[in-house]
Image (spheres, coloured by chain):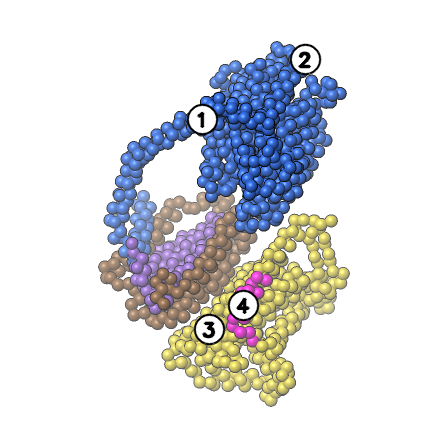
Chain colours: A yellow, B brown, C blue, D purple
Amino acid sequence: MSSMGTTTFEIVINLVKTVLIFLMMVQAVPILVWLERRGSGFIQNRFGPNRVGPLGLVQLLADAVKFLNKEDFVPDKGNRFLFYAAPVFALIPAAVAFMAIPMSTPLTVGDSTFLIQGYEVNIGIVFILGISAMAVYTMLMAGWGSSSKFSLMGAMRAAAQVISYELALGLAIVGVILVYGTFNLTEMIVAQQGPLRFSGFGFDFVAPTAFLPNWGIFFQPLGAILLFCAAFAESNRLPFDLAEGEAELVAGFHTEYGGFKMLMFFIGEYGHMMIAAGLMTTFYFGGYGIPGWTTQEVYAAGLSMFGNETAASVFNTAIHFLSFNIKFAIFLWIFIHVRWTLPRFRYDQLMDIGWKTMLPWALFNTILTATVIFLASQYIIG
Amino acid sequence: MSMDAVLFWFLSIVVIGAGLSVVLMSNPIYSALSLVMTMVGVAALFATLNAYFLAGVQLIVYTGAVMVLFVMVLMLFDLKRELQAFSRGKITGFFKIAGVGVLAGLLVGVITFTTQKTSLIAEGSPLAADIAAQAASGADNTKILSENLFLKNILGFELLGVLLLVIAIGVVALSRSKGGTHARD
Amino acid sequence: MDHQILIAVLLLSPLLGFLINGFRFRSQSYVIAGTVATLAVTVSFVCSILLFIELLALPAESRRITAHFFEWINLGDLNINAAFVVDQISSIMLLIITGVGALIHLFSIGYMHHDKGVTKYFSYLNFFVFNMLILVLGDSLVTMFVGWEGVGLCSYLLIGFWFSDSAKAAAGMKAFITNRVGDAAFLLGMFILFMTFGTLNFYELNALAPTTMEASWLGAVTLATLMLFIGATGKSAQIPLYVWLPDAMAGPTPVSALIHAATMVTAGVYMIIRLNPMFVAAPNTMMVIAIVGAATAVMAATIGVVQNDIKKVLAYSTVSQLGYMFLAVGVGAFGAGMMHLMTHAFFKALMFLGSGSVIHAMHEEQDIRKMGGLRKYLPVTHFTFILGWLAIIGFPFFSGFFSKDEILWQSFSSPRGHTLLWVAGALGAVLTAFYMTRLMALTFWGKSRVDKNIHPHESPWTMTVPLIILGILSVISGFIGVPHAIAEFMGHIPNYWQQWLAPVIRPLPIEELQSVTHTLSEEYMLMGISVFLAMCSAIFAYVVYTKKKHIAENTAQSLKPIYNLLDNKYYVDEIYFGAIINPLVKQSRNLWYYIDVNVIDRMTHVASDVATNGGKLVKTLQNGNMQQYAMYVSLGLIIVLSYVLMR
Amino acid sequence: MLETSMFSEIGLNHYLVLSALLFTIGMAGILLRRNLIVVLMSIELMLNAVNISFVAFSKYNMNSEGQVMVFFVMTIAAAEAAVGLAIIVSIFKRFKEVNIRFFEHLKG
């Protein structure tokens, strides 16, 4: 808990920062919804919301107002406590897990150093996995609390799906942990700095060009694909949105919800999407790193530009924050694009893919990674 | 009061309160949700004891898998609030409650009594200094744990793998049989 | 490292064959099973040859290749390694086991092709080879004992291979139990050696073996070697434990050839030669061995004269020939014993395989009275059988001649020999010539007495090729160890055999050797006498059993008591039953009735009654209410904790 | 008289007492509740209580054995929960209720 700082200044800044990151996550949701609607319109050759404000950007504000003014509806036989608690709990795991993802280099002001993430956890990956595992309860609570067959069925389906794909997700991450030898997300990002470099078996191959970054995707291609697919299932999005079947069925565990409570579920779901995108960026695409320049080089450039250490640090952080957000946005767009491209699986197909295809491949990936790493450290060829 | 102490007291109140509600809630769903709460609290307690990895595993295994199973089963059964949540029998009931009370008292007594007499590690020994240093640094001991687990206790680890396989097969067999030996249909 | 891999391949290749065939034992494809098994042993044979060549390249004193795999047992002073040694003695055994073994595997493909359990058969056979290799290569008595028991197991499995026939299953059990008696003595011998010398490693034991002779009958070395010898009589079918070997002919004929003629039964001789310095130090044991060997040689030969089952004749012949080997080692002629071991492996394997070919041709008919005149049906078998016959009767310049003559001469001339031993050996040779010629005459020559329904036919190439190879070996193998008396007029052929073995054989003490002197002329004379008598007996048998059969019948009639005695194998089985087994069974029955039923069972009944009644009493506690059980647990916890607190 | 250090300085005993209390709560659940699932949950509670003391000992004895033990306990708890729930599902299929008294059929 020492990460909260020692002096009053640090504590205040850290608290403000935490709130800001939470707000950033929450505020990204309207933008994503707008993007999703405009994007789907673009893909389906129509306009999407374009009337309220420039490019329809204010549409979401209008929607929010509409949500807030809706009737606060509770099913007659439902469990009031669970019904109200579920949407609140939907927000918490997503927010808590998202805050553990580092988004930029630490900012140094005077003697104080601020991490551009909610808090640094030494066992980052395990923490994120553990926290996001709790998201299942919100679905179950919502489904149960609604006292409706459709809700309960949707909740069960969603929970079963999430648990099933958590296995493949976890195993895909094991490969990442093996490659970097750490749980710590920041250390992983540091390890991905610099040009591509394979060493082992007595070789030490360094990419001739500095623009070929030392990213995890080159070490764990299969793991990356598996993690990305599992992330789709984890966040209940197409092509894995069986629980909701929002295109033609009733909407899963939140059938009985409306208004702002519904919106909170949406925020939770988009939060999961963001965590997945953040993890993909961090594990396989260098995190906030910029291909071709290490953080030190950027800092040095900032120093020569401004001649002030604080300004250089701010510059450094800002540049890397931008870099992170570009990668992050690309993955979010892929999420959206896939949703409007692929049709849905049948439920048995979904389970088959999870247990009979992805789990074996993830196991294979883990074993292969471990074997190669062991052999590379033990044997020298030539 | 230090931060650690505040955290400990807060967490112990949460854990004990949630634990009590596991036992006392008449609706099993609430019991289960309270148990989830307890387990999150225990995970946080692990973190205060510098066992970060175990805290994560506690979250993944217990709250992420085991308790989800409980909750799902409960919801499938569609159990409502129980009219008679506790077992019958006034005399046995009294004995049980008294027994549990005595047990709690004895346990606490034994703990405070015996560890006051003999401290686990001699005061001022190098080990004690080490402990103080480690406790202060809050160092992560995941590496030590993994070395212990995969070098010293590898056999136990492998056997657990076998156990899990056996359990998986057994559970499938159990839940596929229609009512086991008592099958009526 | 190189050697280690070679020895590992040598050992593991039959084991792999065993596993492959063992896991698909239901298969009835004799081609696959036979090919796998034969290949496995052939690989071992190639390894043996390579190892032999490497040994040749080493200087004579240090011809030893050791492969240390892992530490097996380490208890206090007892330190046993899974280590294997190839030296002068074991390399010869290796070549015999894998070479003859490969040929017999090949033969089995043809012989067993109609059998339903052919895959199982081949897996047993491979497992036998694996165990035999462990027996031979092991660097300590314990490792050897592992192989010793393993070959016993395989022998049991293969004798009782057609276990649906209860007589054959019983034969397997007889072999196993008889061997157990010997094994017990073997273990005792091992214990005595370990107590005395503190090691069981062959090389350490041989280095520690006392150089002064032990005169006492109760000395440690004498006792240990006697015990080991009793173990050897069990495995190598000597008096008094030979009774299992004739019955062991119940197994498939290639098994008889491999296990009960060429390899396993020679394990006893091999063990004695391995530990020769120890045995040299115990003259009393040597005497016992020589006498037992000579007696076995004669006795088995006399029984062989009247047998009518082709395999039984060969079985008694094997017992008799093993007697010769023991006679040789008993008089200190370890090299000669080893030599006879090898030549016998060739010609006896040849004759067993030949008999297998005959039996195959005769559709499982084994009675030689129902054969005769098979020469024209089985030309190859007949011709190779003749080679084996000439070798075993000691026809000059066939392999058996050299080895047997050397043994006879040593039994006369060695300081530990005796004229009577020579006489017994010569008598055995005469009898051997007689019954082997009788076998030839009744089987191949004379008029056909074959049943009209049987049409004998020559065997397929898989069976004849091994016969031919073994035939050639039976003829020429003697020339590697020509005794010096014969070498004299054959142009001074060096005795490669003695040179090869010399570094690992401890000669008899020099003062003993100086006490006896013999001349070359004596050797010629004795050789002449034995060969002449054997040839006479062979010619006599030929005449009697082809031309004048009435002589045999008349003689049998006039000497009825003796004939019956021989026909019933000296009533040894009956004596064993009457004197040992039946009293044992009777006393065991008494023990069972008086001690077991009345005392021990009663005790257990009382105990079980107490438990039953106590259980009935406590049963009320187990009322199915789980929470009460938990209550008991917490009560127990309360008691324990109170004790801790009160203490 | 209460010492304030008891509240401000957290040591091994605090964790052990917490563990003991949690354990007895679980024990009470087993003894008193009639719903099998709740009984099973109480067992999980007790296992968690034991885990706390393992980790506490591990920290205060500088020995990672305790954490390894927790790892094992967690695995076995997961296995036990799976089997227990399977049995309970079987019982529910048979009796349409998950009361502990259905186990009384198993009496000797």
Q: Which residue is drawn at 65% across and 34% down?
A: C384
Q: Which element carries disc 1, helix, strand or loop?
A: helix
Residue lying at the far left in this picture: please name it: B91
Q: How many labels does the image show?
A: 4
**First in sequence: mark 4 vs mark 3:** 3
Numbered circle sitting on residue A352: 4
Please state which amino acid type lies under the numbered disc 3. Ala
Does A357 appear in magenta? yes
**First in sequence: mark 2 vs mark 1:** 2
Chain letter for mark 2: C
Q: Which element carries disc 3, helix, strand or loop?
A: helix
In the picture, measured across the screen, residue A316 lies left or right of residue C211, that is right
Numbered circle sitting on residue A155: 3
The residue that mark 2 highlights is C521
For marks 2 and 1, give the CA distance: 42 Å
In the picture, measured across the screen, residue A332 lies left or right of residue C78, that is right
Please state which amino acid type lies under the numbered disc 4. Asp
- Contact (Cβ within 8 Å) of mark 1 with mark 3: no
Numbered circle sitting on residue A134: none
Q: For the residues tagged 1 and 3, is the chain the same?
A: no
Q: Magenta stretch?
A: A344-361
